[in-house]
Amino acid sequence: MDYFKRQSLHSRLIGDQSVTLTADGEVLIEPAGGKVKIDGDLVVTGNASGPEATDILYVTQDGNDLNDGKSLGPDGAKATIKSAVEAAQSGTTILVGPGDFFEENPIVLPDFVTIRGTGDLRNT
């Protein structure tokens, strides 16, 4: 906070609102061009804001394609990626558990649907 008070805020032009120190101590950075460049290390503490995935479908090896895919485990998850993709709508995130999945191709992914692997780092 001291850095912004001493280094940035005092040299701004009248009417410049790209960096604002609010009454509750927050620093708002809203440059006119919409881009912020940071050279050096950036440390963020606390919660990061941003969109959260709310429409999630799960695929696990012990799932069942008759399930809705809305929860983990054999009674909730789908068994195939293809079944999850067919149930997905725009904005859905499909989380695929670890394992080998043998699928019937082609799988046509709708616009704005994300497929992510879970578990150990691996190619998915």
Image (spheres, grey):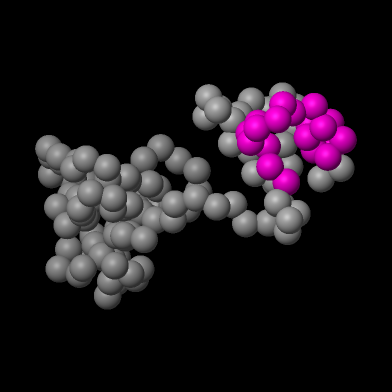
The residue lying toward the viewer, choosing from 96 and 9, is 9
**Does residue 48 appear in the picture of this structure?**
yes
Q: Which residues are magenta?
A: 3-21
Q: Is residue 2 left or right of residue 106?
A: right
The residue lying toward the viewer, choosing from 30 and 92, is 30
Residue at the front extreme?
14
Q: Is residue 32 left or right of residue 9?
A: left
Q: Residue at x 59, y 30 (%)?
A: 31
In the rendered image of this protein, does residue 78 appear above or below residue 119? below
- State the image quarter where residue 32 is shown: top right
Name the image quarter holding the C terminus. top left
Q: Residue at x 40, y 37 (%)?
A: 123
In the rendered image of this protein, does residue 67 appear above or below residue 82? below
Q: Is residue 10 left or right of residue 32?
A: right
**Does residue 61 appear in the picture of this structure?**
no
Q: Position of residue 39 (x, y in %)?
A: 72, 24
Q: Residue at x 13, y 44 (%)?
A: 104
Q: Is residue 69 magenta?
A: no
Q: Position of residue 81 (x, y in %)?
A: 23, 50
Numbered circles on residues, count: 0
Q: Is residue 15 magenta?
A: yes
- State the image quarter where residue 52 is shown: bottom left
Q: Position of residue 88 (x, y in %)?
A: 20, 54
The residue lying toward the viewer, choosing from 77 and 85, is 85
- State the image quarter where residue 107 is shown: top left
Q: Position of residue 12 (x, y in %)?
A: 74, 28
Name the image quarter holding the N terminus. top right
Q: Residue at x 65, y 44 (%)?
A: 28
